[in-house]
Image (tube, rainbow, N blue to C red):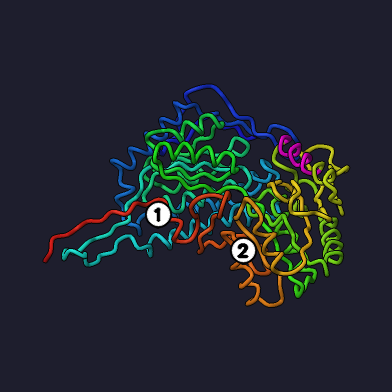
Amino acid sequence: MQVYDKIYIGGEWVEPDGTGTIDVVSAHTEQVIGTVPDASPADMDRAVTAARTAFDDGPWPRMTPVDRAEGIKRLSGALQARSQDLADTISAENGSPKSWSLMGQVFSATMVLDAYANFASSYGWEDRRQGALGSPVLVRRAPVGVAAGILPWNVPLFIAALKLGPAMAAGCPIVLKPAPETPLDGYLLAEAVAEADLPPGAVNVVASGRETGEHLVRHPGIDKVSFTGSTAVGRHIGEICGSMLKRVTLELGGKSAAIVLDDANLDEATLGNLVMSGLMNNGQVCGAQSRVLVSKARYAEVVEALGAAVGALKVGDPLDEAVQVGPLVAERQRTRVEGFLDAGKAAGARAVVGGGRPADQATGWYIEPTVFADVSNDMKIAREEIFGPVLSVIPYGDEREAIAIANDSDYGLCGSVWTADAEHGAAVAAQVRTGVVAINSSMILDFNAPFGGFKQSGLGRELGPEGIDPYTEYQSIILPAS
């Protein structure tokens, strides 16, 4: 039982304004495993004021990029020292399997921070050029101001790093709002921030419900919002920011397709990689390759292989190192996924394996890892983001049709191509309208390359040096002619 009674604002642990609390419930036991203060709008106001003071009057945006990089490195080191505690806490909160949490949830976050420590030193902060009217011009990338980072529950620490890294590199103080389902790892993050000895107000961590989160988005002291979550909520945040002319980055949902070409060699390792591209973190990943496109010539073979591989996955307690699929984050999420299972069956899809709740789990919000065959791309299970351990196998006639099916989606976040010819796979990938496409890999991003989506998968990019761009504004200083 982890109990916290304070909020991290302005480099200090402060008393909350009210008495409300958030109960954190284990996805496996369905028991309360922690409580934290439910921050009020007044608490959020204090956090924004602390960040505003840090920006307007503090040293953080006035430090050199190299000095800020040192702060990022200290934070990364403080998180690494807590790595196992963080991984176990996240697994208990949201059901992420321990076999995936340490690398996928924690070390990946510290690797992102390490990458931004490097980017901070090499980013093009200034460019001196000759102006067209005879005077030299200095073009600067100035920090955009105070940022708000609104985090999801599925990979909370990693997404926090996607926002912390570029904001810290740019000199933007930030207010992080963890999701109410997963605030406990946010408190461990705040402890690491305190240990990293950053200037007061540079990083503030305030857990709250969604209404107070909207108060943060609307706050006039916030210059830039970065949100990761559902497309519906992202659309609402985008409307607010648009009405206020506030800078915004939105990383939203996905319905990614894995295109299996006829020459793909689906040996045991490759098949396992293909399965995990759709089911990693219990399918609770925005870039999950949940649509598997297979030619009619190989359809029966691949469906059978996928069914066998998914049926062999070990389901259970996420803190068991042997478990590959844990529970969903909340009862409402399981109910939602069950609605998709029912919709798939009603539309004529065939559950090759799974399709319900596992009988051997007495508690926890579990769904059997499921493979649907006989799926057409117009079915609900192929159109909407399920966010659970469900794969839909869709047949195609030729390569051109496969690409058309992959692109026939409201989303455009990730994708993959599976083939024996990597060069040809890259040519196919270039025709897929998504932000990231992997060849023969379950990787949905690379820390050194921009990540984000086309269409309803969002606006803007995170990761890579390009991830710093949204936290800066161009400023042109016209110098005297010599």
* Neighbourhood count class around disc 2 (C-alpha, 10 Å): few under 14, some 14–19, many 20 upward: many
Q: Which residue is mark 2?
A: 432
- Asked if 422 appears above or below 447 in the picture, the reply is below
Which label belongs to residue 169? Answer: 1
Judge by depth and name the residue closer to the eye, 52 or 10.
52
Q: CA distance from mark 2 to mark 1?
A: 32 Å
Left or right of 426, for residue 302: right
Query: Height in image: 112 above or below 36?
Result: below
**Residue 212 drawn above or below residue 435:** above
Tell me the quadrant of the picture where the C terminus can be found.
Answer: bottom left
Upstream in the sequence, badge 2 or badge 1?
1
Q: Residues within 10 Å of mark 1 (few under 14, many from 20)?
A: many
**Point 50% across, 58% down: residue:** 463
Q: Amino acid at mark 2?
A: Val
**What span is colored magenta in the figure?**
331-341
| Up-down relation of residue 152 to residue 434 (above or below) | above
Residue 384 pos. (x, y %): 69, 46
Mark 1 element type: helix
